Image (tube, rainbow, N blue to C red):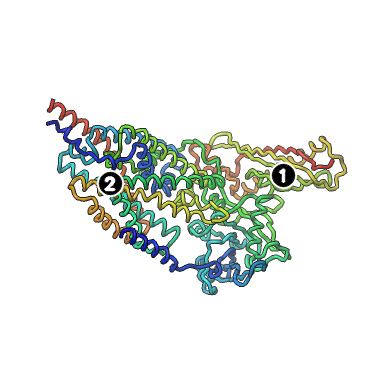
Amino acid sequence: MNKLNNTNSLDIPENYLVTPMYVFFLIHSMQIGVGILGFEKYLVEKAGYDAWISILIAGVFLHLILWMIYRLLQNGGGDIVQIHKNVFGKYIGGFLSLVFSLYFLLLTFTVIITFIEVIKVWVFPSLQVWIFVFVLLSLVYYLVSGGFRVITGVCLISVFIGLPLLLLKYFPVQAGHSLNVYPVISHSVTDILAATKQSILSFIGLEFLLIYYPFIKNPAKSKKWAHFAVFYTTMIYLISLIVTFVYFSEEQLKQVLWGTISAWKIVEFPFIERFEYVGIAMWLYVILPNICLGLWGATRIPKRLFNIKQKYVLIAFILVLFFPAAILEGRPVIDAVNNLSGQAGFYVLLYIPVLLVLKTISDKVRKKREG
Amino acid sequence: MKAKIFLVSLIAVSLLSGCIDHSSVEENAIIQMAGYDKGENKRIRGTVSIPQYEGSGEGSPATEVYLTASADGVKEVEEEIQKQSSKPISIGKLSVTLYSMELAEEGISDIIDILSRDPRISRNMFLGIVDGDTKDVIESKPSSSQESTSSRHLKGLIDTNTQYNFPKTNLHRFLYSYYAEGMDPFLPIIIPKDSTVELDGLAFFKGGAVVGTIPESKSFPFRMLKENFKRGMQKINFEGGTIMLDNIGSSVNYEMKGTVDDPEFDIKIDLKAEVNEMVGINREATPALAKEIEKASVDFFEKNADELIQMFKEKEIDPLGLGNFAKTRKRNFDLTKWKDNYSDLKVNVKINVEITEYGIFS
């Protein structure tokens, strides 16, 4: 029989599906996470004040990747697991899917430990990490076991909670020096591309589409929302970057570890003198979907591969996350983990075009054989 | 069943959260002002002022206690002061930090590093240089003060005056120009006088050390060169008498011409002012007189601006941030080359003064 038709068997019951519009929140909230709190330093180290160009290039690149992801999924018969199986066969494909699962787990882990680092440096230096991780992961377990629709809800809430924080950009702009933003391109193409790579690292998150695609009702209609989400994310990163350019001098920014949080420090209301504490507390809601969707994606793949209950995988993965997250500390370690997951994310994004080419070839070969 | 468990845990969470350690304002020693002097044997002597809320009921003025300790580093001063304090000290509300001129001339890079590192310190904090001992300034609340404590007095003093003749200043601005390439920071100078303290000029930094000062009388021209502002007064000598120019809007614009190797700056300033007082000038307020005053003011400001820029070149400092400006406007900016050429830099200051009003009486 026709193998391609067989593979379309991944039918999710309608009551688990989400409408296409929610793809906007799913993608956008996944792209905004801990990265945006401190991405400025790494960009400025590479390309100085010209780094805004890198953000734009990275945005275009992501739109391309997103287009490819949709090409992959349109007739892929479901999610990445199915595509891998079709292209590489059961064992190699399964192995590659597991790599994806581990990558999603690594992203989740990075988000957790980076956020703990922020809390420790900025708010509670003597935080009992394991208690915090325990409470956080309990909450995440509760949300993830609620299923994909609950996670979508978390994404939606996180976007709306994060919105008012954007208004605070007014304060650093007001205190800043506008003459810094001037389109004098004084860095070489290689510098700007290096910064582009660096900014892609904080943009990762849209590849989760590969796993939750079957949960979208009328997926073809979600395309415009997905592109809109990537565009919106790019704009937010661009605004954040330009605001820190206006607020900090170039050499100063190279030494500021968390540009966005440091810029919050100038915000002062009559009723609250240190806004960064409020900002960091609110940021928990912004990173919550990262952790939830990350864990959901990481656990969904083993479920699809081995047909085990997602709940058991979830418990196992949460235990896997808990111990290192409670133990690891120190800037060098966290920097290393961030670098690792950033690199991994970059290669995952580069892998998508390769996969698209391989899939097109294998589809053609199959068609010929069958035809 | 599930609902019951949920309810019980909800109640438990909300009740148990009351057991957490809490500290109220009265139980903390909240440092509001700190000052650092040069102590003996290359040590730093730190003085802090801590307001006392306990016992001072409503209406009665708050009091302050002052603690002083000597140590090798700033953090050690904090520790030494803790040893003298019965309450845990907290530096989160520190709003003014002063350094003695003696200390600042030797360099305060180490202290600046701590300021940029510590997340508890507000970026809106004021820094100041004291010509004399910071201990004296902190410990003696001027009798003429309108405030209840000396820390509030100094905070208000700097806050208010930087809306008038003194350029805007706070920790963030200081750090901005400290770290920037082609820009050097400055801070206001505070001097203790008989019964009061006053702002008495600006101290200019090169790196972390003060290398030059200007008196208070030159602060207005400097601010004109530095930023746009809407207030402040300047006295101008005119035909044997004096005129008070009341600024109602000054805007400055930098323009850069020429190549990277041979740049030329045009600084254009437009000043709008009112004249409300003329002392020792017996002439009628006519448009012709206004023109003459405008010309005299232009001469005065241009002379002062040139003197200031000449001084900056001599001291090799750049508080106006011309290098920083050049960097954002020109490709291939080379800082060392810029510094080498700085003393020969052509800076043309063009000032336009417009006197718009003479008050409500003619």
For label 2, the SS is helix
Instruction: In the rendered structure, find residue A243 and report the number of the disc placed on it.
Output: none
Place of residue A346 in the rendered image (x, y in percent of width and height, measured from the top left):
31, 42
Place of residue B234 in the rendered image (x, y in percent of width and height, measured from the top left):
74, 47
Closer to the camera in the image, B335 or B234: B234
Residue type at tag 1: Asn
Closer to the camera in the image, B220 or A279: A279
Place of residue A293 in the rendered image (x, y in percent of width and height, measured from the top left):
32, 47
Mark 2–mark 1 distance (CA, rounded to whole Å): 64 Å
Place of residue B139 in the rendered image (x, y in percent of width and height, measured from the top left):
64, 68
Q: Residue furthest top?
A: A371
Circle 2/circle 1 CB separation < 8 Å: no
The image shows residue B80, relative to residue A336, as above or below, that is below
User: Mark 2 belongs to which subunit?
Assistant: A
Which quarter of the figure is the C terminus of chain B placed in? top right
User: Mark 1 belongs to which subunit?
Assistant: B
Going by the image, does B310 lie left or right of A9?
Answer: right
For label 1, the SS is strand
Residue type at tag 2: Gly
Residue at mark 1: B247
Residue at mark 2: A297
